Amino acid sequence: MITDLYSLTELEEAIAIAPAQWRPLVFTNGCFDLLHVGHLRYLRVAKSLGRSLIVGLNSDVSVRTIKPHPTGWPERPIIPDIQRAELLAALKPVDGVVIFSQTTAAQVIDKLKPEIYVKGGDYRIETLPEAPIVQAYGGRIELVRIEIPTSTSGIIDRILQTAK
């Protein structure tokens, strides 16, 4: 059992019961397939921006939708969502994980209304589908500089090139 894995309803209730324990709430989201040190450093920075950090994790179904695999590549995600959630929940900066099945985290953000929404510096606010929701309720969007330019796709590509 993963103690820091919540349904959206459970997380809403936990925050409502003890807002001082959670707020200011920082939220980020992603696939987090093949967890690497770039993810960890990013999550550390995100956590430093508030009291608690919630990670919205794309479900297996949503990963397959947003990360189609090129010919010769394994289907994504490599790691099932419940295992990715367990790994994320075990990381020191992470206070909770919520798995969502949509292609964006807009619905989760709309429900939780985090004070701070964080994405990597490779994104732009203008192109973030979640940005209008965050801006509408007065939340802040932070784009965190990528310390180590590592990506799961790059790791998979390197493995496949080595195997040839």
Image: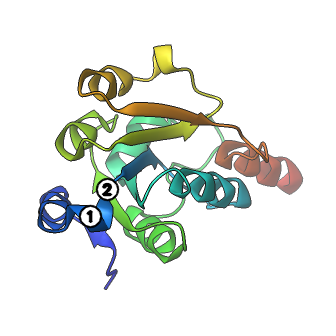
Q: Residue furthest front?
A: 20
Structure colour scheme:
rainbow
Q: Which residue is mark 2?
A: 23
- In what element is the residue under mark 2? loop
Q: State whether residue 15 is above or below residue 115.
A: below
Q: State whether residue 123 is above or below residue 160.
A: above
Using the rendered image of the protein, determine whether residue 68 is visible from the camera's viewpoint.
yes
Q: Amino acid at mark 1?
A: Ala
Name the residue: 22% across, 61% down.
19
Check contact, mark 1 vs mark 2: CB within 8 A: yes
Name the residue: 49% across, 77% down.
90
Place of residue 139 in the rendered image (x, y in percent of width and height, measured from the top left): 34, 32
Q: Residues within 10 Å of mark 2 (few under 14, many from 20)?
A: some
Using the rendered image of the protein, determine whether residue 69 is visible from the camera's viewpoint.
no
Name the residue: 42% across, 60% down.
51
Does 51 sit left or right of 23 as displayed?
A: right
Place of residue 129 in the rendered image (x, y in percent of width and height, measured from the top left): 37, 23
Place of residue 119 in the rendered image (x, y in percent of width and height, measured from the top left): 53, 38
How far apart marks 1 and 2 lie (CA) works out to 6 Å
Does 138 sit left or right of 8 as displayed?
A: right
Name the residue: 53% across, 67% down.
93
Place of residue 86 in the rendered image (x, y in percent of width and height, measured from the top left): 43, 74
Q: Residue furthest top?
A: 126
Q: State whether residue 123 is above or below residue 148.
A: above
Q: Which residue is mark 1?
A: 20
Q: Amino acid at mark 2?
A: Arg
Does 85 sit left or right of 91 as displayed?
A: left
Does 3 sit left or right of 157 as displayed?
A: left
Q: Residue furthest bottom?
A: 1
Q: Quadrant of residue 71?
A: top right
- In what element is the residue under mark 1? helix
